[in-house]
Image (spheres, grey):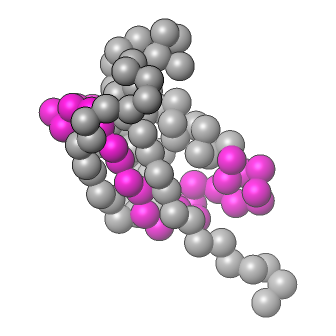
Amino acid sequence: MAKRLGLDPAPQARCCIEIIKEALEHAGSGLHDVVRTRILLTNIDDWKAVIDVRAEYFREIKPVDTIMQVTRFVNPEWLVEFEVDAVVANPTE
């Protein structure tokens, strides 16, 4: 991922959210069901660039947010990781 996206947190954040979006859609859900995001950064100073990307995807719904700095990821070129919690209502109930 990093070679394709470079060592820039914004495109890496966009890639993370696109992967999450695709996984949610595959499960019959979507970003509109996200209630919480957790953002892990290797450099906390990158928070603004990453939050700006997050805001592009979550304009309508505003999930709660946690931002943390970690020492490193397995791949040293990774700068950001996203985790999300989504709540999906059962349409049959």
Q: Any magenta on residue 87?
A: no
Q: Which residues are magenta?
A: 23-49
Q: Is residue 2 above or below residue 42?
A: above
Answer whether residue 52 is visible to the viewer in this image. no
Tell me if 15 is positioned left or right of 23 in this view: left
* Identity of the residue drawn at 75% across and 80% down: 90
Measuring 72% from the left and 51% from the top, which residue is drawn there?
Answer: 25
Vertical comparison of 12 with 63: above or below: above
Q: Residue at x 68, y 43 (%)?
A: 22
Instruction: Compare residues 50 and 43 and report the one nearer the observer.
Output: 43
Residue 54 position in % (x across, y down):
39, 44
Residue drawn at the location 67% of the way across and 53% of the way down? 24
Q: For residue 7, what is the image quadrant?
A: top left
In the depicted view, which residue is nearer to us: 80 or 62?
80
Q: Is residue 66 visible to the viewer in this orientation of the structure?
A: yes
Query: Looking at the picture, how far across and down is residue 65, in whole percent?
Result: 32, 59
The C terminus - image quarter: bottom right
